[in-house]
Amino acid sequence: MNRRVPIALVPVLALTLAGCQSAPASAPEPTGDGHGAIAGATELAEPALHLTSVTPAGEVHHLDLLDETSESLGEIARPTSLETDGRFLYAGRDGGVGIVDSGVWTWNHVDHFHYYEAPAALLGDLTGGGEPTVVASDLGAGVHFDGGEAVLLDLDALKKGRLEERFRLDVPAGAGMVVPLPTGALVADADGLRHVDATGAELETVPCTEPAGSITTNVGVVVGCADGAVLAVTDADGTTFERIPYPAGAEDRAVSFAAREGRPTVAGATGGDAFWLLDTRERTWTRIDAGEPLARVVAVDDADQHVVALTATGEVLVLDGETGKHLARTEPLVAASLADAALAPGVTLQIDANRTYLNGPAEDALFEIDHVDSARIARTFDADAPAFVAETGR
């Protein structure tokens, strides 16, 4: 059933990002005697899943997937990119990154989960020279400005509503990444990877030619390289780095990675018809040719090994991750958005265990797709030019 849902607007006071001003947010995750309790937040029985979207003009909207209401969180500077860790949004543009706390999140306590909701807030603006590349996970957020600056943000401070830096380093101008680790980070540039501590002091170099793309799994932190990947695994003894090479004869490489949060198997897009599946638990690569150009690809890594892709013609395609067989396909949903060069970069697939979410900026819509049930379109939400979107609360 294709159901288009008009959003009931809940008006709130508009906020505008300015400098490093911040609004109240929640405290860090609970520990010790305060287990389960967070000042200023409500603990819930189930995750408060939302779609938080940003228009081309920088208007931030927050859609509750349970009751289908939406509120406006205010405005940020016009973004050209968006990254998320499932709670915080990092909206990049030339010269800065606007940071939004969605106010909804899940805390993994190893054998069970806690779910929280607190007031959403626009936390501030991180400035730097040039275009930013953001790597965000539950380990933190790293920002690389291509003008020559590398920044690691303090995640605990963000949880308290403050924008603070762990370090800011001068680095070579050009493409690069700052990849958060449980302690410190990996700083990537054209020369490879440098492992640094939380103050930015260099600990060691890690061989990696042409680093591009990163993702955090429940095994470790992945950074893509020209000849494979580096897997950083941290335990009580520290962080070790393993090399996972491509199979002999590989003719292409993964340039970005995407997967359901925390899963061990991730999809690596090549920019063409094929994609790689990297199993970080088994340290193996599998190449699958979809037979048509793909704009996005994400590993669901469920019991049936589903992979969800967005074709270059705007259709959502569900594949078998073991055989590459096409299992289901939607009609073209976002063809107009992909054809618009100004809108296409923000069109993404957001994946959880049961649903795929797709934004159509030109179509003024957000699509909820059941990737297990023959790519059935479960709901379609009216939305004001959702140029970028993140599923939050997970």
Image: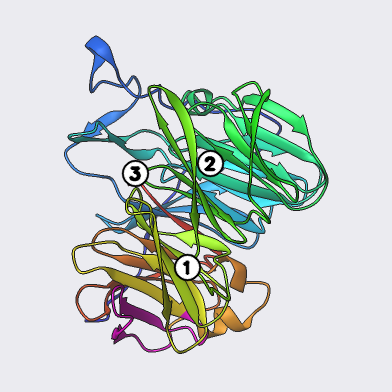
Q: State the mark number for residue 100.
A: 2
- In the rendered image, which residue does mark 3 sit on? 218
For label 2, the SS is strand
Nearer to us of marks 1 and 2 is 1
Name the residue that disc number 1 marks: 247
Real-space Cα distance between discs 3 and 1? Answer: 23 Å
Query: Dot 3: within a 10 Å radius of its alpha carbon, few (fewer than 14), some, or many (20 or more) residues?
Result: few
Residues at badges 1 and 2 in contact (C-beta under 8 Å)?
no
- Front in this rendered view, residue 87 or 18: 87
Mark nearer the N terminus (3 vs 1): 3
- Span highlighted in magenta in the image: 311-332
Residue 213 located left or right of residue 353 = right
Q: Quadrant of the N terminus?
A: bottom left
Marks 2/3: CA–CA distance: 25 Å
The residue lying at 18 percent from left, 35 percent from top is: 112
Query: Which amino acid, mark 1?
Result: Pro
Residue in front for this viewpoint, 82 or 6: 82
